[in-house]
């Protein structure tokens, strides 16, 4: 019950009081949050601190009547799970899950779960939920994709306008649907899919997430084929011109 409660609260609070910017922005601009948390998982530390500040407000401390040890255990779970939503932890978490599945099989085959495995599973669950929008049906995934891309574009423009920072390639031109679809395809294929592939092995009940993800990648690829990027069109014309010259 403690593990479940901690996991649910982590999922509920993992983005509480989000600034609408990312960790790179906070660090690059030396924001108050970055200074407070020493440039390490800045927003995640902020979400954790905000969560426990809220729990200390009058009438909000749902842990108040729990035994001291249970409260300590809940805090430990919440801190670990929210820190795991930092995208710098993504590939290490994915690799750790792969190792767990290779060594011990699916969750149904686990017995006498070690403490480290328990925390890994909790962290994976919350992190996967945080990245789950592309695993929904396409209309919902696309709606979330548009919202996230808008946030990224706003961040990039603010960095450039106020701080003279260069716009990262993956955040450039996202107002163009074709560029956004291209970035979505790459992000889903190289970042999100490996996680959900291992999650489906560990917890087969989540295999529908992987199927939806693959279907969405195919849909984005189809949209790209039907609406080529300008540079793709130019390359196609150049290649056609070369073929004509050869003949």
Image (spheres, rainbow, N blue to C red):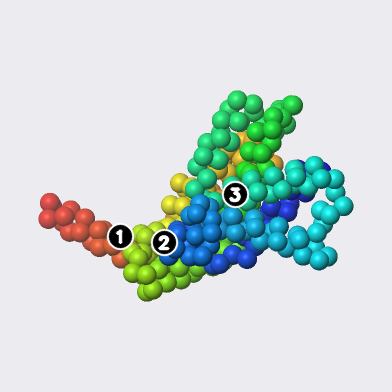
Residue 232: image tag: 1
Q: Quadrant of the N terminus?
A: top right
Q: Secondary structure at mark 1?
A: helix
| Dot in front, 2 or 1 | 2
Going from N to C along the chain, the mark reached first, 2 or 1, is: 2
Is the residue 82 above or below the residue 50 in the image?
above
Q: Residues within 10 Å of mark 3 (few under 14, many from 20)?
A: many
Height in image: 126 above or below 144?
A: above
Nearest the viewer among 82 and 76 is 76
Which of the marked residues, 2 or 3, is nearer the chain's N terminus? 2
Q: Is residue 211 visible?
A: no
Whole-percent x, y for residue 74 in the image: 75, 46
Q: Is residue 164 left or right of residue 54?
A: left
Picture residue at 54% right of the left edge, 67% below the top: 20
Q: Categorize mark 2 by other alpha carbons within 10 Å: few (<14), some (14-19), many (20+).
A: few
Label pair 1/3, CB-CB below 8 angstroms: no
Q: Is residue 228 left or right of residue 108?
A: left
Q: Tell me where residue 141 sits by quadrant.
A: bottom right
Q: Which residue is mark 3?
A: 83
Q: Is residue 129 visible?
A: yes
Q: Is residue 75 left or right of residue 223?
A: right
Q: Nearer the viewer, residue 142 or 77?
A: 77
Residue 45 x/y as whole percent: 59, 55
Residue assigned mark 2: 28
Q: Earlier in the sequence, mark 1 or mark 3?
A: 3
| Alpha carbons under labels 2 and 1: distance apart | 33 Å
């Amino acid at each position: 019950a403690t593990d479940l409660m901690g996991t649910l609260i982590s999922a509920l609070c993992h983005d509480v009081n989000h600034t609408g910017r990312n960790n790179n922005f906070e660090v690059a601009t030396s924001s108050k949050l970055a200074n407070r948390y020493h440039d390490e998982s800045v927003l995640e530390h902020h979400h954790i601190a905000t969560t426990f500040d809220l729990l200390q407000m009058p009438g909000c401390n749902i842990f108040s009547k729990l035994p001291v040890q249970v409260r300590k255990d809940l805090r430990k779970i919440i801190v670990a799970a929210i820190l795991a939503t930092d995208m710098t932890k993504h590939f290490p978490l994915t690799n750790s899950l792969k190792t767990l599945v290779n060594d011990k099989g699916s969750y149904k085959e686990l017995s006498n779960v070690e403490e480290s495995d328990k925390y890994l599973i909790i962290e994976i669950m919350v992190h996967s939920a945080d990245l789950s929008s592309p695993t929904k049906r396409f209309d919902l995934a696309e709606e979330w994709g548009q919202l996230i891309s808008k946030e990224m574009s706003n961040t990039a423009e603010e960095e450039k306008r106020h701080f003279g920072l260069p716009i990262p390639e993956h955040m450039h031109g996202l107002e163009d649907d074709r560029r956004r679809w291209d970035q979505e395809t790459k992000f889903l294929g190289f970042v999100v899919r490996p996680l959900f592939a291992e999650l489906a092995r560990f917890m087969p009940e989540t295999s529908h997430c992987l199927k939806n993800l693959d279907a969405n990648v195919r849909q984005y690829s189809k949209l790209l084929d039907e609406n080529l990027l300008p540079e793709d069109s130019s390359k196609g014309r150049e290649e056609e011109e070369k073929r004509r010259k050869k003949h």
